[in-house]
Image (cartoon, grey):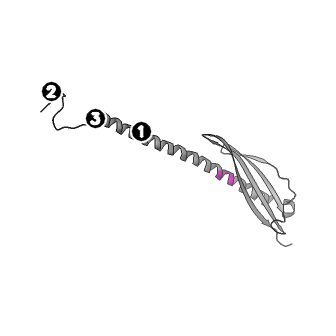
Amino acid sequence: MTNKATGSRRGERGFTLIEVMVAAMTLLLLFFGMAQIFSKSRGQLVLDEDKRNAIAVAQARLESLREDYSHQDLVNIAASDTVYNVGGRLYTVAHEVAADSPEARATTVTVTVNWTASLTGGDITRSLECTTILGRSRD
């Protein structure tokens, strides 16, 4: 039977406009919440990628120093800054050499990598330091 005033059948139920609007708002809130989580996750992935690149650059410098210089020459090399471009980001690398540290016949080499990370709030300077101890065999 049809109700002539409202045009609906008795016993049938549908969603009211208010129910549809509440459901739509709930879905929108969920969507924007997920979008924010995705955005923050993407930013963290970029920071992690930068850090992996910085570690690789520091390890390359340590290997270069280990292979290119003898133990006697290592303490006399000048600490120079070198800039590497990895994945479009510039990494500035410097090193320090401490002779007879932590004991005689050992040399401590510290490599410092600096770079600028771009975040949504602006740019921040990041830094990573790697240290190794190189020993010398008895002559």
What is the distance, in whole Å, between disc 1 and disc 3 at their CAs?
A: 19 Å
Picture quarter containing residue 14?
Answer: top left
Q: In x, y percent, where is residue 94? A: 78, 51
Q: What residue type is labelled 3?
A: Thr
Give the label on residue 16, or none: 3
User: Is 61 placed above or below 31 here?
Assistant: below
Picture quarter containing residue 107?
Answer: bottom right
> Earlier along the polypeptide chain: callout 1 or callout 3?
3
Give the label on residue 4, or none: 2
SS at circle 2: loop
Q: Residue furthest left?
A: 1
CB under 8 Å between callouts 1 and 3?
Answer: no
Instruction: Count neighbours of disc 2 (C-alpha within 10 A) and say few if under 14, some if 14 to 19, many if 20 or more.
Output: few
What is the distance, in whole Å, between disc 3 and disc 2 at their CAs?
A: 19 Å
Residue at 64%, 48% in the rendered image? 50
Q: Is residue 139 left or right of residue 20?
A: right
Residue at 75%, 58% in the rendered image? 62
Q: Residue furthest bottom?
A: 138
> Earlier along the polypeptide chain: callout 2 or callout 1?
2
> How would you classify the magenta stretch by its main secondary structure?
helix
Q: Please say whether residue 69 is visible from this viewpoint.
A: no
Q: Which of 66 and 15 is in front in this view?
A: 15
User: Is 2 placed above or below 114 here?
Assistant: above
Q: In x, y percent, where is residue 47? A: 62, 48
Highlighted range, magenta: 51-55
What is the distance, in whole Å, between disc 2 and disc 1 at their CAs?
A: 37 Å
Q: Which amino acid does label 2 sit on?
A: Lys
Q: What residue type is labelled 1?
A: Leu
SS at circle 1: helix
Give the label on residue 28, or none: 1
- Number of labels in the image equals 3
